[in-house]
Image (cartoon, grey):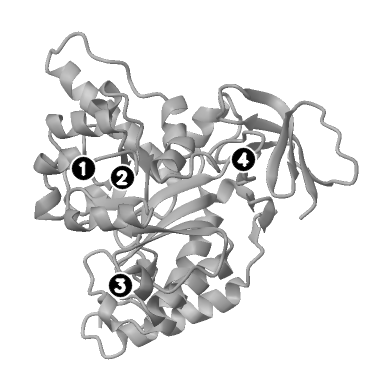
C-alpha cells in the first residue's frame, strides 16, 4: 500500500496525547497512521499538499439504513418497503448510499440491514466491498443466513431489538445493536438493565428514563443519537445534558436519508444546538446554576472518536493516533463558505459542509482525491436510477422523476 505524506495542513488528531497542530504533517504507512507532527520527512512517500486544509479523522456514522438511500429526501411520500427490493435493488441502494457517505467525509459507517439474509445480504456485502468504506453490518438474521462479508473492512454485529436474542449474539462473539426507542421491550430498559454491557450499542434513547441512563453509564453500554432523523420522525430528542452529566459520550448518526441529511456536519450542529436550546430555555425560565454549554471540541469527538468507540471500533479508528488505521479526511479551508478560519474546530462544526471535503482515506487508501470520488460514480448513479424506477413503476404517488403524478 506504500506511504503517503499529508503535508502542511492544520492537523486535528483528536488524540489528547498526540495533540492538535496549527501546521503539521501526517505520515501514512501500510494503511496506518505512522507519525503526526511538523516537518516530517518520508523518502519515497506520495506527497499530498494539505496547505489550506484541515486534516482530521474521518467521520463515523454510527447508525444508518443504507438500503433506504433510494428514498433520499422522500419525506412523507410513498416509499417502497424492503420486501419489494430485489437483490439488485439492494446492491444499488446500498452502494449509492455508502458512496454518498464517503463523499461527505465519512470513513466508518454502521449499516443496519433490516432485510432478509441470503441473496439480499450477499448483495449488500458486495456493495460494502465495492464502496471501500469501513463498515459494520448489523443484521438480525441468523449468522448462517446472513451470507459473509466480502471485504476485510466489514465486520458483523447483531441487531438485537428482541432482547431474547442477546444471549445468542454474545455466544457468537457479536456486538449488539438495539433500537432503544422503537420496540415495546426497549422503551425504558426496565428489566433489561442487568443485560447491558460494554458490548451493547443503543440507538435512539428518546424514551430512556433517568434510571435507564444510570444503568447505561454503569454498564459501559454506548448510546448513538441521530438528531436530525429523530426530530423529523417525531421522536422526542434525548436530553444531551443528561448524557453529559453521567459521562456518557454518544456517537452520532444519520439513520435514514429519507427525512434527513446524509452527513455528520448536520448531525453535529443538531446535537450541539439541541443542548444549547435546552439550557437557554431553562435560563429564560429563571433557573440558576445551569451547566456549561456543550462545546465544539466535545461534539466533534461525538462524530469521530466517540462514535468509533460506540460501535466497538475505538481501537482501530476515530483519531489520528500512530498505529491506528489511516481513516482520514482532508477539509478545504480556502472556500468562501468558511474563510477566514478563526478557530479550526469551530469551523468544522459550525460552518463546513460536504463541499469542503477534498480528500478521503480509508485504511490509507485514497477514496476521494481533490474533491472527486475514485469510484465509478456514473455506474453507481445509473444503477440507483434503474432501481428507483423499478420501485416507483406503477406508483400512484410518485413518478420516476419523483414528482406528484
The residue depicted at 55 percent of the width and 41 percent of the height is 337
Asked which quadrant contains residue 390, the reply is bottom left
CB under 8 Å between discs 2 and 1: yes
Find disc 2 in the rendering and name its residue.
200
Q: Position of residue 325 (x, y in %)?
A: 62, 45
Decide if residue 38 is on the left or right side of residue 154.
right
Find disc 3 in the rendering and name its residue.
115
Decide if residue 27 is on the left or right side of residue 327.
right
CB under 8 Å between discs 2 and 4: no
In three-dimensional space, the C-alpha distance between marks 2 and 1, rounded to whole angstroms, equals: 9 Å
Front label number (1 vs 3): 1
Front label number (3 vs 2): 2
Q: Quadrant of the N terminus?
A: bottom right
Q: Position of residue 58 (x, y in %)?
A: 55, 45
Find disc 1 in the rendering and name its residue.
195
Helix, strand or loop at disc 1? helix
Q: Quadrant of the C terminus?
A: bottom left
Sequence-wise, the earlier of marks 2 and 1 is: 1
Pick the residue in front: 10 or 207. Answer: 207
Pick the residue in front: 99 or 397. Answer: 99
Relative to 375, does residue 265 appear above or below in the rendering? Answer: above
Front label number (1 vs 4): 1
In three-dimensional space, the C-alpha distance between marks 1 and 3, rounded to whole angstroms, equals: 26 Å
Amino acid at each position: 500500500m506504500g506511504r503517503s505524506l499529508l503535508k502542511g495542513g492544520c492537523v486535528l488528531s483528536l488524540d489528547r496525547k498526540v495533540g492538535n497542530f496549527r501546521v503539521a504533517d501526517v505520515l501514512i504507512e501500510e494503511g496506518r497512521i505512522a507519525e503526526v507532527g511538523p516537518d516530517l520527512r518520508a523518502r519515497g512517500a506520495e506527497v499530498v499538499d494539505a496547505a489550506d486544509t484541515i486534516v482530521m479523522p474521518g467521520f463515523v456514522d454510527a447508525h444508518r439504513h443504507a438500503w433506504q438511500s433510494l428514498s433520499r429526501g422522500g419525506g412523507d411520500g410513498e416509499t417502497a418497503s424492503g420486501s419489494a427490493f430485489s437483490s439488485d435493488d439492494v446492491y444499488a441502494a446500498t452502494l449509492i448510499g455508502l458512496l454518498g457517505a464517503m463523499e461527505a467525509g465519512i470513513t466508518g459507517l454502521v449499516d443496519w440491514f433490516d432485510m432478509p439474509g441470503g441473496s439480499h445480504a450477499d448483495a449488500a456485502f458486495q456493495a460494502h466491498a465495492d464502496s471501500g468504506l469501513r463498515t459494520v453490518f448489523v443484521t438480525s438474521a441468523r449468522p448462517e443466513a446472513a451470507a459473509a462479508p466480502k471485504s476485510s473492512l466489514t465486520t458483523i454485529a447483531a441487531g438485537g431489538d428482541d432482547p431474547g436474542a442477546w444471549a445468542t449474539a454474545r455466544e457468537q462473539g457479536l456486538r449488539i445493536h438495539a433500537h432503544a426507542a422503537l420496540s415495546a421491550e426497549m422503551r425504558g430498559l426496565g428489566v433489561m438493565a442487568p443485560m447491558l454491557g460494554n458490548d451493547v450499542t443503543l440507538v435512539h434513547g428518546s424514551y430512556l428514563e433517568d434510571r435507564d441512563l444510570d444503568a447505561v453509564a454503569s454498564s459501559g453500554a454506548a448510546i448513538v443519537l441521530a438528531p436530525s432523523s429523530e426530530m423529523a420522525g417525531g421522536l422526542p430528542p434525548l436530553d444531551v445534558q443528561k448524557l453529559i452529566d453521567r459521562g456518557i459520550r454518544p456517537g452520532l448518526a444519520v439513520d435514514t436519508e429519507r427525512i434527513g441529511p446524509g452527513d455528520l456536519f448536520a448531525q453535529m450542529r443538531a446535537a450541539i444546538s439541541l443542548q444549547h436550546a435546552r439550557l437557554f430555555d431553562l435560563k429564560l425560565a429563571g433557573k440558576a446554576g445551569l451547566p456549561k454549554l456543550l462545546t465544539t471540541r466535545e461534539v466533534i469527538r461525538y462524530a469521530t472518536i466517540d462514535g468509533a468507540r460506540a460501535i466497538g471500533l475505538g481501537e482501530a479508528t476515530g483519531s489520528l493516533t500512530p498505529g491506528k488505521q489511516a481513516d482520514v479526511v482532508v477539509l478545504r479551508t480556502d472556500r468562501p463558505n468558511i474563510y477566514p478560519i478563526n478557530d479550526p474546530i469551530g469551523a468544522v462544526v459550525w460552518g463546513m459542509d460536504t463541499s469542503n471535503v477534498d480528500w478521503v482515506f480509508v485504511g490509507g487508501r485514497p477514496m476521494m482525491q481533490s474533491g472527486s470520488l475514485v469510484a465509478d460514480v456514473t455506474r453507481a448513479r445509473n444503477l440507483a436510477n434503474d432501481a428507483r424506477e423499478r420501485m416507483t413503476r406503477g406508483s400512484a404517488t410518485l413518478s420516476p422523476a419523483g414528482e406528484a403524478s
